[in-house]
Amino acid sequence: MTINTKQDFIKHLEKYLKNDKLKKQYFLTSNFYGIAKTEDLIIVDNYDFSGLDLKNLDLQGLNFINCKFDNCEYLSEITFRACIFNNCSFTNSHLNDFKFLECDLIKTTFKKSILTYFTFGDSLLSDTVFISCPEILEFYFGGCEFKNLSFNNVYLAYARFEGHDRENYDFKISFNNSLLDNNLFSHFDLTNSVFRKCSLGQTTFSDCIISKNSIDKSNSAKGNEFSFIDFQTIIKSESLEPVVLERCFGINETIIKDKITEVTKKIEYQTIFISYSFKDKAFAIVLNDSLKKKGISTFLWEKDAPGGKGLKKIMKENVNKQDRLLFIASENSIKSKACQFELTEGRLKQEKLWKETLYPIHIDNYLFEVEKDDIRPFEFQEEYWLNIRELREINSINFCEVNVKIGTVEFENKVIELINGLEKTNE
């Protein structure tokens, strides 16, 4: 069936509308169902829908060809099921809460429009472009196929691009001269996709594949809001240019892929007892969480100390139970009697086993500045000084600069450096 005129279209609508009240060009709270079979799609050819306000429509089995949805003040809560849009346009319109389910969008243009809360499920987007749109918010793409999908000069925020497991499938998307803010690419092959002259603000790439040509040095971060790239993406992808890693992701390590590949091997790591001052608790908790996420077994007093036992007994038992004592060195911990007790236990264990047991990191420089005569009380001066000297003999990882930026890329790079020293050896 072919609909060529406005009158034909309205007559056809009247056959299917549950609420057949048509007021001028407004279709409100109505449902229209076409024919689902592809060969029997209802063809809507060269129809101009410009200037309409549409709300709460569920349309199925329509083939829109050369149709215009332009200058529509507000189109909202519209679902298209098994529909085709071929050479259609949405220009200067405000579109909200659209769902495209098992639809094909071919040579379709969204231009100078505000687009919010869109869902594309199991759909094809081919030669489709979003251009000069000031707001594209809360888009979700799930199980879709992309062939030459473009975003040009747009603001795209809180969009989710989720891939699928089909074989021999390429996504081809281009992002040009656009601001991308808080978007997610998950399980996505971006080998043939490109980002050019874009500002990437806190955009996340999780379990993706990226080629060295996908993101070039014409892109940058939005201020200091760097984007995020996970281990799996780095391992699966080609090595990105150092300037791209620095500008877009805040990563200054040029051999990051080699380091992460090494870290993510199936390696057994030493268990650790984390010794820290309660005044540095916030740092210790974040560090502990980061280590646990990377597969390191830890004992942190804040979370793991059992009740009903003496404090020193808990310290002594667990220092000896774990492989290493990770000491968070600071003025607070050096002056802490509890931390010094734990250090003494770790040092004695080290002397007994003739193995490296102590593992210091420092969040200020007090470990290297304190003098023996500074130590109080005097009766513990010799013991504490032995602990301090022992720590100074070991290479301590410097967390001073990232201490105020816990949880950032710089912080995580330091954690990786720490983990490299925890690999079990065949002693």
Image (tube, helix red, strand yellow):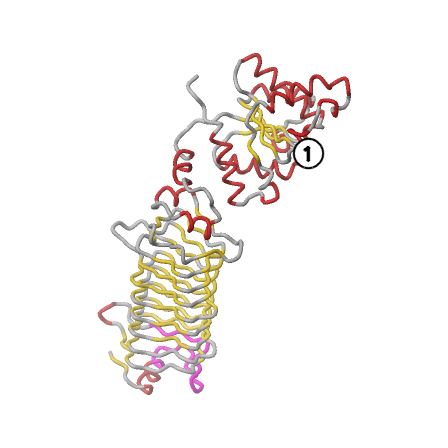
Q: Residue at x 58, y 31 (%)?
A: 361
Q: Is residue 26 left or right of residue 106?
A: right
Is residue 361 shown above or below 188? above
Q: Is residue 19 left or right of residue 361?
A: left
Furthest residue to the top?
352
Q: Within 10 Å of the Cα at label 1, are there few (<14), some (14-19), or many (20+) other Cα atoms?
A: some
Is residue 210 shown above or below 118? above
Residue 268 lies, in percent from the top left, at 44, 26
Q: Is residue 258 left or right of residue 334?
A: left
Q: Is mark 1 on a helix, strand or loop?
A: helix
Tell me if residue 32 is in the magenta stretch: yes
Residue 315 lies, in percent from the top left, at 64, 22
Q: Which amino acid does label 1 sit on?
A: Phe
Q: Which residue is drawn at 40% across and 77% down?
A: 91
Residue 396 lies, in percent from the top left, at 56, 29
Q: Mark 1 points at which residue?
A: 278
Asked if residue 315 can be seen in this view, the reply is: no
Q: Residue 278 sits in which quadrant?
A: top right
Front-most of 152 and 116?
152
Tell me if residue 28 is in the magenta stretch: yes
Residue 372 lies, in percent from the top left, at 71, 22
> In the rendered view of the protein, which quadrant contains the N terminus?
bottom left
Q: Give the range drawn in magenta.
A: 13-33
Q: Residue 49 sits in which quadrant?
A: bottom left
Q: Residue 154 sits in which quadrant?
A: bottom left
Asked if residue 92 can be seen in this view, the reply is: yes
Front-most of 167 and 228?
228
Q: Residue at x 39, y 40 (%)?
A: 257
Is residue 415 shown above or below 166? above
Q: Residue at x 48, y 68 (%)?
A: 135
Q: Is residue 92 left or right of residue 309?
A: left
